[in-house]
Structure formats: structure tokens, C-alpha cells
Image (tube, rainbow, N blue to C red):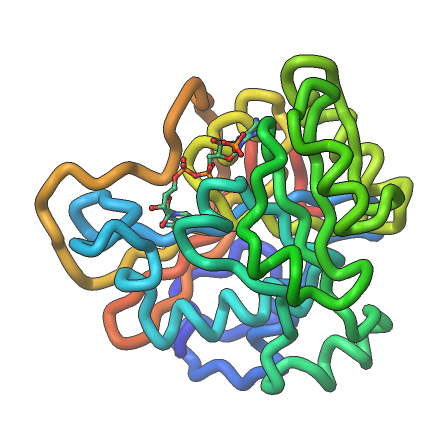
């Protein structure tokens, strides 16, 4: 893996091969406050899913390495219920490659998954196999499954934020109050668009996989996410996969 551009750290020689330590430095979360980083992958022709309708078939080895690192640098993953269902999410584990780095950074070994859903319809296996406290739900008061999901996950792990709709700003604030200040939003396109529309995304990390799939696959946002003025911070490349890091308007590296 090599750095093509790094706007922040002059110490990282562009073009040089990256060790895991340097890669972790490159992706360090700026500051100690709240930071919401979103990560998505797309093909060269802009599809967020492969021919099978899932993003897993677009991911590459290089993208997996950075994806694992981003989790290891975060307090929790935030994901839309559609992605949790389509991609068969289970309780998340930190990639063994990054466990020591995470411990050295003072982050807890257990890694919670926070699912956002109006309906409260979580995948059954996720609810029934996750260790206590490893899955949280962000939902709204009209969710028809509120009682069931509270019983399954524990009331303290169900965040009711909003009446008929989820208020994402309240949700992010409530998660921060629970100690989850560094969030990694893993999509999908609907949740990402809503997070951008609510001005909650500080950093957008987009990988471009060296494939084209044609078809009518979704883009990485679906909804009203119109924003200009993203600042390009980092470009990393391996085997044709380009990994870019954009700072969102209104956010700063430090
Ligand atoms: N390329 C990538 O990096 C990437 C990443 C992730 C996913 N994907 C792909 O994206 C596709 C899924 O797309 P999607 O747009 O349906 O995904 P999504 O945003 O994960 O799921 C949509 C569902 O999530 C919940 N949700 C999202 N935003 C919400 C909000 N603001 N408030 C309340 N609930 C909210 C709702 O769940 P309820 O219906 O339960 O209310 C909604 O129906 C899959 O094919 C997946 O493979 C691609």
C-alpha cells in the first residue's frame, strides 16, 4: 500500500510503502471530541453494489485492510437496518491484525454495532447470537417492535430518538453520552444520505475498486445529500484500489 497524497502529515513520504503503524497514523481520528467517519466502496462506474446486489462483492483485499483499521480506530459501527439485513450483519469483532494497535490506543476490546431503523426490524440471527451490549438499536417511538427489541437487547441498548422518524442528531448525541464518540458509519446509501443531510458526517472515506459492473446498482448515497466543498485529505492505493479520505464541509482535521 502506498500514499499518493497526505495533506496533513509531512512525515509520511508520498509514494513510500506503508507499514501497519504508518497506516494507522494516517487514519488516526483527529482530536479527542466527537467524530463521525463514514466509509463506502464503489466501482469505477459508480455502483455501490456488485452484480449480486451486495457491496461485499465490490470490496477488495486492500479495502478490507483499511475497513478493518477504521473499525479498530472507532468506538462503534453505525449501520442502516437495510444493510444489516442485506449483508447479514452479526456482532462485530476487531480484525486480529489491529487488536494490539487498538489496545495501545486505549480503546476497549469489545466493539458495538449500532443499527438505525424506523421499524426496529433487526435480523433475527443478529439479535439472538450477539453477546450482551454488543448490539444497540437507534429507533423512533412509533417502532412497532419496541417492546420486543428492548427485551432482546436490554432497554439501555435501545435508543428512542424521535417520534415518527429517527432524529439522527439526537441519536449521535445520545451515543456520545454513552461514550461512543468516534463512530464509523458503514452505510448503506439511505442512512449515509440522511447523515450527510443532517450535517453529521465529518469525514467521508470512499474506496474505488478497480472494476466496472454496469447495471443499475445504487450509488453510495440515496436521498438528499447534496453538499459541496469537501476537502481531499488522503489518497492511498494498493493493487488498483484507490482509498480516498474527504473532510466534510464544516469539519476540520483538528
Ligand atoms: N458500497 C458500500 O460501501 C455499501 C455499504 C453499505 C451497504 N451497501 C449496499 O446498500 C444496499 C442497501 O441500501 P439501503 O439504502 O437500503 O441501506 P440502509 O441505509 O442501510 O438501509 C435502509 C434502511 O435502514 C433504516 N434507515 C436508514 N436510514 C434511516 C433513518 N434516517 N432513520 C431511520 N431508519 C433508517 C431503515 O430501516 P427500517 O426499514 O428497518 O426502518 C431503512 O429502510 C445493500 O445492497 C448493501 O449491500 C453498500
Position of 159 compared to 40: left or right?
right
Q: Quadrant of residue 134?
A: bottom right
Residue 135 locus on image (x, y percent): 71, 55
Q: Quadrant of residue 148?
A: top right
Residue 164 locus on image (x, y percent): 66, 13
Q: Residue at x 21, y 41 (%)?
A: 217
Evaluate whether residue 249 shows in this view.
no
Q: Residue at x 53, y 41 (%)?
A: 81
Position of 6 compared to 162: left or right?
left
Q: Residue at x 77, y 70 (%)?
A: 110
Residue in front for this viewpoint, 234 or 140: 140
The total of numbered circles placed on residues is 0
Residue in front for this viewpoint, 51 or 232: 51
Residue 234 locus on image (x, y percent): 48, 56
Position of 86 compared to 123: left or right?
left
Residue in front for this viewpoint, 117 or 27: 117
Q: Residue furthest top?
A: 164
Q: Eyeballing the image, is 42 above or below 200?
A: below
Q: Residue at x 35, y 69 (%)?
A: 237
Residue 48 locus on image (x, y percent): 30, 46
Q: Eyeballing the image, is 130 above or below 248?
A: below
Amino acid at each position: 500500500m502506498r500514499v499518493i497524497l497526505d495533506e496533513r502529515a509531512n512525515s509520511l513520504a508520498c509514494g513510500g510503502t506503508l507499514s501497519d503503524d504508518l497506516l494507522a497514523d494516517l487514519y488516526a481520528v483527529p482530536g479527542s471530541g466527537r467524530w463521525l467517519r463514514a466509509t463506502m466502496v464503489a466501482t469505477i462506474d459508480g455502483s455501490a453494489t456488485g452484480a449480486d446486489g451486495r457491496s461485499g462483492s465490490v470490496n477488495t483485499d486492500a479495502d478490507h485492510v483499511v475497513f478493518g483499521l477504521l473499525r479498530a480506530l472507532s468506538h462503534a459501527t453505525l449501520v442502516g437496518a437495510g444493510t444489516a439485513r442485506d449483508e447479514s450483519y452479526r456482532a462485530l469483532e476487531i480484525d486480529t491484525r489491529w487488536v494490539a494497535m487498538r489496545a495501545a490506543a486505549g480503546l476497549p476490546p469489545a466493539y458495538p454495532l449500532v443499527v438505525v431503523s424506523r421499524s426496529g426490524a433487526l435480523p433475527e440471527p443478529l439479535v439472538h447470537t450477539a453477546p450482551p451490549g454488543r448490539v444497540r438499536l437507534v429507533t423512533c417511538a412509533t417502532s412497532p417492535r419496541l417492546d420486543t427489541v428492548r427485551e432482546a437487547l436490554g432497554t439501555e441498548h435501545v435508543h428512542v430518538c424521535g417520534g415518527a422518524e429517527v432524529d439522527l442528531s439526537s441519536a449521535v448525541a445520545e451515543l456520545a453520552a454513552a461514550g461512543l464518540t468516534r463512530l464509523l458509519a458503514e452505510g448503506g446509501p439511505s442512512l449515509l444520505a440522511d447523515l450527510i443531510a443532517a450535517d453529521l458526517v465529518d469525514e467521508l472515506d470512499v474506496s474505488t475498486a478497480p472494476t466496472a459492473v454496469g447495471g443499475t446498482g445504487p450509488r453510495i448515497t440515496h436521498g438528499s445529500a447534496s453538499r459541496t466543498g469537501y476537502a481531499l485529505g488522503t489518497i492511498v492505493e494498493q493493487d488498483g484500489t484507490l482509498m480516498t479520505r474527504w473532510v466534510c464541509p464544516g469539519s476540520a482535521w483538528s
